[in-house]
Image (spheres, rainbow, N blue to C red):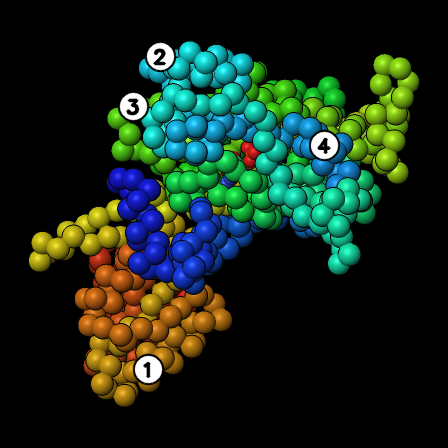
Amino acid sequence: MAAPNIDTIVSLAKRRGFVFPSSEIYGGLGSAWDYGSLGVELCNNVKQAWWQWMVHERDDIEGVDSSIILNRLVWQYSGHEATFHDPLVDCRECKSRLRADKLDFEEGALPTDVGEIAQLITQKRARCTNCGSTDLTEPRPFNMMFRTMLGAAADENDPSALAYLRPETAQGIFINFLNVQTTMRRKIPFGIAQIGKSFRNEITPGNFILRTREFEQMEMEYFVRPDAEHSKLVDEWVEQYLEWFVGLGLARDNLQLHEVPAEELAHYSKRTVDIMYRYFPERPEAERQWEELMGIAYRTDFDLRSHSNKPTDGEGNRINPDSTDDLSFFDDGRKERFYPHVIEPAAGVNRTVLAVLMDAYSEKTNDKGETRVILKLRPQLAPIKAAILPLAKNKPEIVGMAKAIKRSLQPVLRAVYDDTGGIGKLYARQDEIGTPFCVTVDHQSLEDEAVTVRDRDTWEQDRVKVADLPEHLQARLRG
Ligand code: GAP
């Protein structure tokens, strides 16, 4: 089973220390969330799993970590200043500001572009999602990049001090293409991966960590020849990602593909396939159950060409007179120079974490008829791998032995010690946060130097010698 809805995860996440509403003591900040002690471990484990899979286990990918604030010209030539817009409408009735494509449209009306949305608004066939009014303004473009000013003396209106928080990590990769390619002595094809925060001034953020203004991306730009089979490469990356997500514990049935229609493609994309996750299983209409988990785009040579100082327009003028370099690649073997084309798998850390939590959620009834939540996280992702629990916390020898076992495990896996409740309560707490193993130290342990290892999913218990414990747990964690 999976979580019946996102709200179930919101409440578990807050109750158990995965995710808290941000700035709560000041009334919160719309759709901002803070990751708690378990949440930060889970996020780190997702990112580590991705980096291991994407960079370390492949021969053709390098990593980078670029600045969040880049020269403003990066966003001018990437096209984001001119086109990174969402269509915004105001409700005249309740004064809400809404994303035009997220309005409630009359049944059967499925607009595919802003022109059609404007028509539906004029015909009063679109409603405010907040109050239901049809008294809405025309859609107008709203740039989603967060602006900031650089330098202590910056004047609010000084364009030379204007900068943006990056809305995608990808551009930090493109502007470093030559640096990485030459220092790492790479030939085409190869890829560059990056994990990091991105920022978008979303008009209507919401649904917990699904759509926020600050989020984290795991992006990879794969550089290939202009005559490569680009569409086939997109399909190959889709397949590899489906496999990766299933390996992280997502049910294949909860994943679906969406070929983005031509009129909805980003300005740089010739083809994009989104991998969708069933974040809203409770919705009766099947098509409304899905939201994007990640996208795989064919970005052509758009970015490297735009950031290069050589390409010219039809009249012979340089399209980028500001760049100091040419980001083309010289193929020694073929004696040929070209701008590499790019296949980009772009995933969100937060959306992956939410999907992982939803799919791991399960309930089980114990022999007293009580329902227990079990978070069946893959061991690799579990924030805590083993909890060491003393059966009697008033017995110093048992407590001492349990603490010593915990200390001995710490260098090899994430272990915690807990004596803040009866054993049943302690087991339930660890089940709910996804800890694969509970290790119980009891009276007999003092005699036989052995402990009980309880499995989260089956609740079965094995007796294991303390000396064998690190190896035993590591083997079972590897699966
Ligand atoms: N470089 C391409 C790019 O950024 P995107 O589809 O806009 O493509 C990639 O973003 C992924 O980043 C999305 O599939 C999603 O997982 C994540 N993402 C985008 N906007 C987000 C937001 N407001 N909140 C949380 N995650 C977001």
| Residue 271 drawn at (x, y percent) | 59, 21
Mark 2 CB near ligand 1 (8 Å cut): no
Crowding at label 3, few (<14), some or many (≥20) Cα neighbours within 10 Å? few
* Of the image marks 3 and 1, the number of the one nearer the N terminus: 3
Residue that badge 2 annotates: 108
> Which residue is drawn at the image coordinates 32% and 82% (left, top)?
401
Marker disc for residue 78: 4
On screen, 251 above or below 8? above
Q: Of the residues tagged 2 and 4, which is closer to the observer?
A: 2
Residues at circles 1 and 2 in contact by the CB criterion of under 8 Å: no
Label 2 Cα crowd, 10 Å radius (few <14 / some 14-19 / many 20+)? few
Examine the image and state in which quarter residue 178 appears: top right
Residue 254 lies left or right of residue 145; in this view the side is: left
The quadrant of the rendering that contains the N terminus is top left
Q: Secondary structure at mark 4?
A: loop
Sequence-wise, the earlier of marks 4 and 1 is 4
The residue that mark 3 highlights is: 285
**188 left or right of 426?**
right
Q: Position of residue 168 (x, y in %)?
A: 62, 39
Q: Residues within 10 Å of mark 4 (few under 14, many from 20)?
A: many
* Amino acid residing under circle 4: Ser
Q: Residue furthest left?
A: 368
Query: Which one is nearer the viewer's eye here, 20 or 235?
Result: 20
Give me the residue at 56% from left, 40% from top: 201
